[in-house]
Amino acid sequence: MQKKELRAYIRELKRQYSHEQLKQMSSAITNRAIDFIHNYDKKDGCKTILLYHSLPDEVYTHSLISSLSDKGYTVLLPTVIDNENMELHIYINDEEYHVGAMNIQEANGDAFDCYEKIDLAIIPGMAFTKDGHRLGRGKGYYDRILQKIKCPLIGLAFPFQIVDNIPCEEHDVKMNYIIS
């Protein structure tokens, strides 16, 4: 399948689940993510985590964001600044958001551009392969920002988002881990 066809296929699979079902499935995935982060922190140290504020059809991250922040981690969330780029902002709390591009909740905290200080990055995707290839929504926002990040990259995915093959291009960045 080509990227466009694969996106349509995954969208159709997502439509088979209610928002509540996706949220329930997300709970197990985010619990695994918390365990991963805790173990990673014990071994390698972890203070700053890039996350995403999930859309209704993505692995639900809202409680993960506040939980990690409550545990003392600096949580970064992307903000779309134009048709091609995102910048990162520090998450403060659940009241400090604004609705940005594509109706995504974006953090109102200070801008953050010390990419070398990011310890882990948790990234959304339409689909992933077991070996880390990622299919985004097609705008390339994450591809551009991931070029600047050198920490481990983690994709969060529902089980039906794990596919055998994704057409890859030179600029595509592989995930180090997929949590499903």
Image (tube, rainbow, N blue to C red):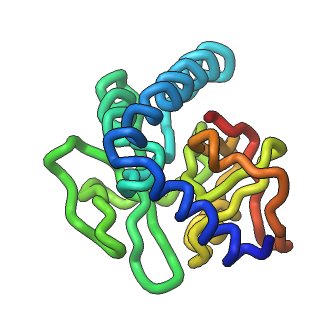
For the point 45% across and 67% down, which residue is it?
87
Relative to the observer, which residue lies in front, 65 or 59? Answer: 59
In-image side of 63 versus 11 (left or right): left
- Please state the horizontal and vertical placement of residue 88, each as a whole percent of the image: 44, 59
Q: Is residue 80 above or below residue 122?
A: below
Residue 89 sits in which quadrant? bottom left
Residue farthest along the bottom direction in this orientation: 83
In-image side of 70 versus 64 (left or right): left
Relative to the observer, which residue lies in front, 42 or 126? Answer: 126
Residue 70 sits in which quadrant? top left
- Please state the horizontal and vertical placement of residue 4, each as a whole percent of the image: 67, 77
Is residue 8 visible in the rendered structure shown here? yes
In-image side of 84 versus 3 (left or right): left
Relative to the observer, which residue lies in front, 152 or 23? Answer: 23
Image quadrant occupied by the C terminus: top right
Relative to the observer, which residue lies in front, 40 or 111? Answer: 40
Image quadrant occupied by the N terminus: bottom right
How many numbered discs?
0
For the point 39% across and 39% down, which residue is it?
21
In-image side of 168 versus 24 (left or right): right
- Please state the horizontal and vertical placement of residue 45, each as a whole percent of the image: 60, 23
- Please state the horizontal and vertical placement of residue 116, each as a whole percent of the image: 62, 49
Residue farthest along the left direction in this orientation: 95
For the point 42% across and 83% down, which residue is it?
82
For the point 65% across and 60% down, which residue is it?
146
Q: Is residue 34 above or below residue 77?
A: above
Is residue 118 visible in the rendered structure shown here? no
